[in-house]
Each structure stands twice: as C-alpha cells, then as structure tokens.
Image (cartoon, grey):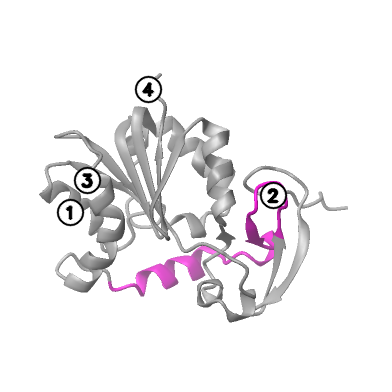
Amino acid sequence: MSAPVVCPLCAARPRMFGDAHGRSFLECDACGLTFVDPAQRPDPGTERARYASHRNDPADERYRAFLSRLLDPLLARLSPGSEGLDYGSGPGPTLSVMLAEAGHPTAIYDPFFATDPRVLARTYDFITCSETAEHFFEPGVEFMRLDALLRPGGWLAVMTSLREDQPLEEWWYARDPTHVSLYRARTLEWIARRYGWTLERPHPSVALFRKADT
C-alpha cells in the first residue's frame, strides 16, 4: 500500500484539485501550493530536453529586459560588492552575467547544467531563483536549502508566475510539463513566515525575501 501524498512544501494533507493539460493536480489548503501528482512528474531526460530547448542568451536584449523585473529591485537593495548565487541558472546563464556587470560576482548552480558541489558548500549575500521555483519537485527541501545558503540579512529573489483563481486548463503557465509546483501570493507569505523572512513584492511575478540579520 503506497504512502499517502503530502504537500511537498508544508507536508500537510492536500486535496485533489482536478485534471488539466493531461496531468492531475492537487492543492494544499494549508499553504496554498498547487502541485502535480508526484506520479506524473517528468523524468530527468524529459526535464533536461525541455530546459535545453530554452534559447537564453546574455546578448538577447529582450531576455535581459525580462530578467530586469527581478534584477532592478534586487540591485536597489544590495550593498556594493555583494556576492551571490543564481540557483537554477539553466543552459544559458544570463542573470549572473548581468549581476557581475553591476559589480556583484555571482556563482551559478543548476542540477542539469552547472553541478559543481562546491557552490553549495558556502553562503551568499543574495540568491536569485528566476523561473525556477515552479520546477521544484520538493519545494520544502529546496527552500530549506536556500535558507541555509543565505547569509544573515541576505536576499532571496524569486521570479515565478502566481496562481490566482483562473482555471488551470486556461492558464498558459500550467501547460509546461516541467512546471510542477504552482504558487499563490499566500504561498509566498507562508514561506516567509516559515523561515522568519520579510517579503516584498515589487512586481506581480517577483518576490524579494530578506533573511533576518541574526
């Protein structure tokens, strides 16, 4: 007999939400996370192929403008020379390049394309997580790791499109087979409470979490 499914963010018991785009979704009333049935998560080969198809390029001005939704408000809050990590940098790291151009050396980590374990053996003044959190199979584990990687007083900048009350069948963001964890505004608030972080929302798809100084 298989173990009951629990929310991968807060471990509460979820409820079945419905089917959309050929997948079954569950929703957690405790933290607000909507997530794909764990039995329907993509395999590593499917994930890698999907990510490798992304044409992210530091020379693409439109892509830079997209990333500026996260970059600009983060830069306004960083001290000169702050050191960072782009977590989930993908096959064409760009945000780390933009941060370095602004005077903030930024390491990269990605489970498929930049897997140097030494990057995860130190701490940082800030961490960026752009269009990555929706891919987390176990967001509870991932946010715990991010908290451990962040220095006191540091910033975690997350960009992901948020659920409102639109039907999943009509929401383009839920169509991507690698988008397995979908967040609401109240989910971000739950995360902030869980780790004692403050939360700012400078853009509808951007969350800036700040870790306490001590």
Between label 4 and label 1, give the one nearer the viewer. Answer: 4
In the figure, is residue 73 to the left or right of 19? left
Q: Quadrant of residue 194?
A: top right
Alpha-carbon neighbours of circle 2 within 10 Å: few (<14), some, or many (≥20)? many
Between label 1 and label 3, give the one nearer the viewer. Answer: 3
Q: Which residue is mark 4?
A: 213
Query: Can residue 168 be spotted in the picture?
Result: yes
In the figure, is residue 187 to the left or right of 212? right
Look at the image and give the residue range highlighted in magenta.
27-55
Q: Amino acid at mark 3?
A: Leu
Q: Residue at x 19, y 33 (%)?
A: 79
73 or 107: nearer the viewer: 73
Alpha-carbon neighbours of circle 4 within 10 Å: few (<14), some, or many (≥20)? few
**Image coordinates for residue 44, horizontal then vertical, percent:** 51, 63
Q: Is disc 1 in contact with disc 2, using a CB cutoff of under 8 Å?
A: no
Q: Residue at x 11, y 50 (%)?
A: 101
Alpha-carbon neighbours of circle 3 within 10 Å: few (<14), some, or many (≥20)? some
Q: Amino acid at mark 2?
A: Cys
Q: Amino acid at mark 1?
A: Val
Indicate the secondary structure of the residue bearing disc 1: helix
Q: Residue at x 71, y 46 (%)?
A: 30
Q: Which residue is mark 3?
A: 75
Distance of mark 4 from mark 1, alpha carbons?
27 Å
Say which label, 3 or 4, has the lower sequence index.
Answer: 3
Query: Can residue 138 be spotted in the picture?
Result: no
Indicate the secondary structure of the residue bearing disc 2: loop
In the figure, is residue 49 to the left or right of 34? left
Q: Which residue is mark 2?
A: 7
Q: Amino acid at mark 4?
A: Asp
**Image coordinates for residue 39, horizontal then vertical, percent:** 70, 63
Q: Which residue is mark 1?
A: 97
